[in-house]
Image: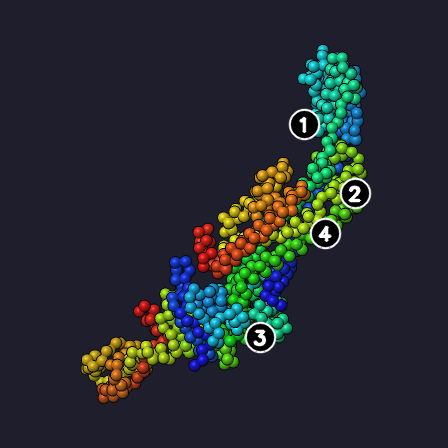
Amino acid sequence: MEKLLVARNVSKTFGNYKALNDVSIEVPKGSIFGLLGPNGAGKTTFIRIINQITMPDTGQVFLDGQPLQPHHIQHIGYLPEERGLYKSMKVGEQALYLAQLKGLSHQEAKTRLKYWFDRLDIGDWWNKKIQELSKGMAQKIQFVVTVLHQPKLLIFDEPFSGFDPINANLIKDEILTLREQGATVIFSTHRMESVEEMCDHIALIHKSNKILDGKLIDIKRAYKSNTFEVGLHTQNPDAVTAELHEKFEVSPATFKSINNELQYKIKIPEHASPNDLASFLTTQGQLTHFVEVIPSANDIFIETVQKN
Amino acid sequence: MNHLSLIIKREYLNKVRNKSFIIMTFLSPLIMVGIFTLVAYLSQLNNDKVKLISVLDESGLFTDQFTNTPSLQFKLLSNVSLEEAKSTSEENSDYGLLYIPKTATIDDLSKSITFYSEDSPSLIVMDDIEDAIEEKTNTLKLREAGIDAQTIKELRIRIDANLETFQGEETSKLGSGLKLAFGGAAGYLLFMFIIIYGNMIMRSVIEEKTSRIIEVIISSVKPIKLLLGKIFGTTLAGITQFLAWVILIGVLSAVVTSILGIDPSAVPSPQQEMIESGGGVESIAQDVILEIANLPIANLVIMFILFFIGGYLLYASLYAAIGAAVDSETDTQQFMLPILMPLILAVYVGFFTVIENPHGTVSQVFSYIPFTSPVVMLMRIPFGVPVWQQIVSVVILFATFIGTVWFAAKIYRVGILMYGKKPSYKELIKWLKY
């Protein structure tokens, strides 16, 4: 797949502190790329390097195959985690100013702003000052300003913080629409459910090093442990339990069920087929529940970070 | 439109439209003219009241000595006792009663003259009275010694030295005073401008930090552009305000003068009295115009502009760096001292050393040091500074300006993204290497 953004062996040191250590990341065109990592891992530094706010000590970043240059700023839309607007400036004026800084002409910026303000139903805020708006309202303006110049690459750092569930959903849909229209999205967040929902690729940075990256599906495949959650309705539970413990790695499980049944997590050997387990279980009673345990993004995050 | 002009435009409009900025622009001249008018009015009021002084002269020596002035009137009493004089004087609510007893010798008088009054008398009034008495006693003493006072008066010669430079330029003490006024005004103006608008730049940097918009902005423009845009935008707003002040003060003074007949600039000052005692007002005005024409006007204007821009930008970039380094205005204190010290030093050197000796070693040295040169050199130029010295000083100033902008940009670039901790000087030096 074609890569929109390629970072090669990027390192950055602040004084004695190494913020990024030889990090290489490739972001495929048209993907929603989750940039994950615990607090202070170096995500923000990496994002700032992409935005040319800080320069890497070593390593290179390419956008569309070209080494990053100042004019690339027009092709990137960045919503930082630490965000805000001029409090005493009017909404419309401010949005125009920020759009013009991104290289849009005054006229063009105005037309597009009108479109977005109508789309998000915030047209009557144009002449209000930011200090008159709530935090969520200001966030909406900020979102519009980020995407207004139709950048190829969108970078969102915790885009949903400060939004109520309705507006968070609205913004999520807008991000997905932008992706449909051809934008590539880098998405940094601690909310694993949105990663699960939206990202197709992820990279995990921990203590300045990239420790994991790839397609989310591939990673999940790699992290699955051949474990199945089973429910079995049986006449002699003690005997079955004893036999299961003998043959497999068994741990207790609890899931919601209407049956009064045995509930276990069972891990089968590496090359065994789940069919073997299933057919064994069917001989012992009525199989009411059989699901492969797929690691969630949350599990993968915690497991990988703790392992390192 | 390119980024820099966009930023300058925003900074300018943002400042100029700011409510407190507008209020200050109109209120300051009002307050200033108002205060001067009030002072002028009050001092007129004060002078208008005639002070009546009764004189009981038992010695009989001073009957002709006290002449009435518009503010002082003397009433000679005779054939009354001191007690009676005191009580009538008090009843009439006179300003005071001067009692001169009869003494054996004139020398005895010195200790025995008394002035009775309700409150402590004005020092100026007492000086006048004492002068009058002294003049008379001196004449009497001279006569006693057999010397004619009139002869001495005729023999006295007043010396008024003509001043001329080796190049043949005629100067005068009046000229020196004017030069001092020009230099002082220029230096002081710059000093005020730096403090007022430097602070404004610093606050605007802090505002961008606290509102957290800074990261959005610098993902679009280079920090150095933002820094320069901020400095230029605020400077333009400052010049606008200054011009508005000059015009408003001019107009208001004219209005006040014509309506109330009070001249706000006519607050009596020692210099004015000195000038007035020296000759007619008209001839003074002519002299002033002549002296102004003698000043190196072109040189003064060009250098004023250069030093003003250079000096202001130098300090403005430092103010911006401070703004970037801290989180809130309360944290700026520790960094303000190193900025204010050279500024205040410059003004002190200007007003004390330059006045005493415009071309002395101290004055010269400080007119090369870039942090003091704008103020000190501006004050020296009216006294005639060789052009090469001026050029060297300007070059040093602008070279240093480039240095401080580089330094400020470094601090700024790192500082605007630093939150939460109050940086130490050590930390700032570390930032330079990032």
The residue tagged 3 is A116
Res. B120 mark: 1
Which one is in front, A296 or B360?
B360
Specify the amino acid type for callout 1: Ser
Specify the amino acid type for callout 4: Ile
Q: What is the C-alpha distance between the residues marked 1 and 2?
A: 32 Å
**Sooner in the amino-acid sequence: mark 1 or mark 4:** 1
Which class describes the residues within 10 Å of circle 4: few (<14), some (14-19), or many (20+)?
A: few
Q: What is the C-alpha distance between the residues marked 3 and 2?
A: 62 Å
The residue tagged 2 is B261
Please name the residue shown 39% across and 78% down the image: A215
The residue tagged 4 is B247
Specify the amino acid type for callout 2: Gly
Give the farthest residue toward the top. B104
Q: Are marks 3 and 2 on the same chain?
A: no
Image check: B119 left or right of A194? right
Q: Chain letter of disc 3?
A: A
Q: Are marks 2 and 4 on the same chain?
A: yes
Specify the amino acid type for callout 3: Trp
- Of badges 3 and 1, nearer the viewer stands 3
Point out residue B160 in the picture as x, y percentages from the top left corner: 74, 30
Q: Are marks 3 and 4 on the same chain?
A: no
Here the colouring is rainbow
User: In this picture, is A156 found above or below B238?
Assistant: below
Where, quadrant-wise, is the C terminus of chain B in this rendering? Answer: bottom left
Please name the residue shown 59% across and 63% down the image: B4
Q: Are marks 3 and 1 on the same chain?
A: no
Image check: A215 left or right of B8? left
